[in-house]
């Protein structure tokens, strides 16, 4: 039979467990949030001498500096289109990401791909990711100005429409603050240099934090 002292000790241990989380999983015990940066040369780090300056690496460092426990997985292939992304997403999901940033469409615009084709591919790509209940951040892109206003309007409307359809987060323009600035781009005026990538990361960071919040809610943390 348990004595009064024994009851008191048991009660104290229950209180302490409630206060300090003994026997429970804390946020610190959770595995890193695995974020797949799925895209083209802009996420692959095209033209950069050190891939430590590429988008996935800089994003991971910026998130860790804010206290997040993350692994940002590089999933960029230079020259890839939305159709190419759709064709390889199954293989990329084998990495078991907790969330995906989709950065595709730039090469569709450069090649003047019919916006209807781009939308169909992006729609299928995001739908496949969401099929596994994985949170998605769609990074939008703008069409080259030489393709005309009609093309630009049709192209630009793709990204918010697909994001809304699949309940994904939207970052309107991946190159915001960087496009067109020679000091932030490489000699081709298309691909960002390390300083340009840093600005991209700074600007997209709040949206990525929202993505991480969605993962944490799924985990119950």
Image (spheres, helix red, strand yellow):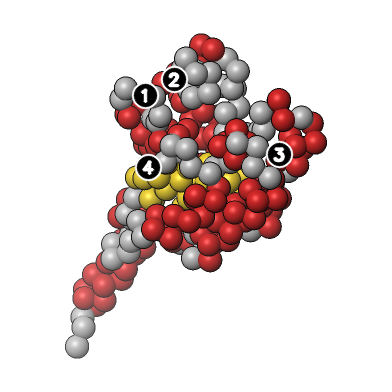
Q: Which residue is mark 4?
A: 74
Residue 9 relative to residue 128: left or right: left
Q: Secondary structure under badge 2?
A: loop
Q: Are marks 4 and 3 in contact (CB under 8 Å)?
A: no
Q: Kindly identify which residue carries mark 2.
A: 193
Q: Which residue is mark 1?
A: 48
Q: Name the residue nearer the viewer: 3 or 134.
A: 134
User: Alpha-carbon distance for marks 3 and 2?
Assistant: 25 Å
In terms of sequence position, does the residue under pointer 3 or pointer 2 come before the other?
3
Camera-side residue of 14 and 219:
219
Tag 3 near tag 2, CB within 8 Å = no
Disc 1 to disc 2, C-alpha distance: 7 Å
SS of the residue under disc 4: strand
Please identify the quadrant where the C terminus is shown.
Answer: bottom left
Tell me the crowding category of disc 4: few under 14, some 14 to 19, or many 20 or more residues within 10 angstroms, Cα based.
some
Real-space CA distance between mark 4 and mark 3, rounded to the nearest whole angstrom: 25 Å
Write down the quadrant of residue 18 in the picture.
bottom left
Counting residues from the N terminus, which is met first, the one under dot 4 or under dot 2? 4
Q: CA distance from mark 4 to mark 2?
A: 17 Å
Residue behind mark 3 = 156
Q: Are marks 1 and 2 in contact (CB under 8 Å)?
A: yes
Residue at image point 36% right, 45% down: 73
Residue under the point 45% across and 34% down: 41
- In the rendered structure, which disc, 4 or 1, sits on the residue that comes first in sequence? 1
Q: Which mark is residue 26?
A: none
Q: Nearer the viewer, mark 4 or mark 1?
A: 1
Residue 9 at x, y percent in the picture: 24, 70
Dot 4 or dot 3: first in sequence order is: 4
**Mark 3 or mark 1, which is nearer the start of the sequence?**
1
């Amino acid at each position: 039979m348990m004595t009064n002292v024994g009851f008191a000790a048991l009660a104290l241990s229950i209180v302490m467990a409630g206060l300090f989380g003994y026997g429970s999983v804390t946020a610190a015990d959770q595995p890193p949030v695995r974020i797949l940066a799925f895209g083209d040369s802009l996420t692959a780090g095209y033209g950069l001498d050190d891939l430590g300056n590429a988008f996935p690496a800089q994003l991971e460092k910026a998130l860790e500096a804010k206290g997040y426990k993350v692994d940002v997985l590089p999933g960029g292939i230079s020259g890839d289109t939305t159709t190419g992304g759709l064709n390889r997403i199954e293989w990329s999901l084998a990495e078991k990401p907790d969330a995906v940033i989709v950065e595709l469409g730039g090469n569709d615009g450069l090649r003047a791909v019919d916006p209807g084709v781009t939308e169909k591919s992006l729609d299928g790509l995001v739908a496949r990711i969401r099929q596994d209940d994985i949170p998605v951040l769609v990074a939008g892109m703008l069409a080259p100005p030489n393709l005309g206003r009609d093309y630009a309007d049709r192209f630009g409307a793709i990204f918010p429409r697909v994001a809304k359809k699949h309940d994904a987060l939207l970052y309107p323009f991946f190159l915001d603050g960087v496009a067109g600035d020679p000091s932030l781009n490489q000699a081709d005026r298309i691909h960002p240099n390390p300083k340009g990538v840093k600005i991209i990361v700074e600007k997209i960071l709040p949206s990525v934090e929202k993505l991480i919040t969605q993962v944490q809610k799924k985990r119950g943390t």
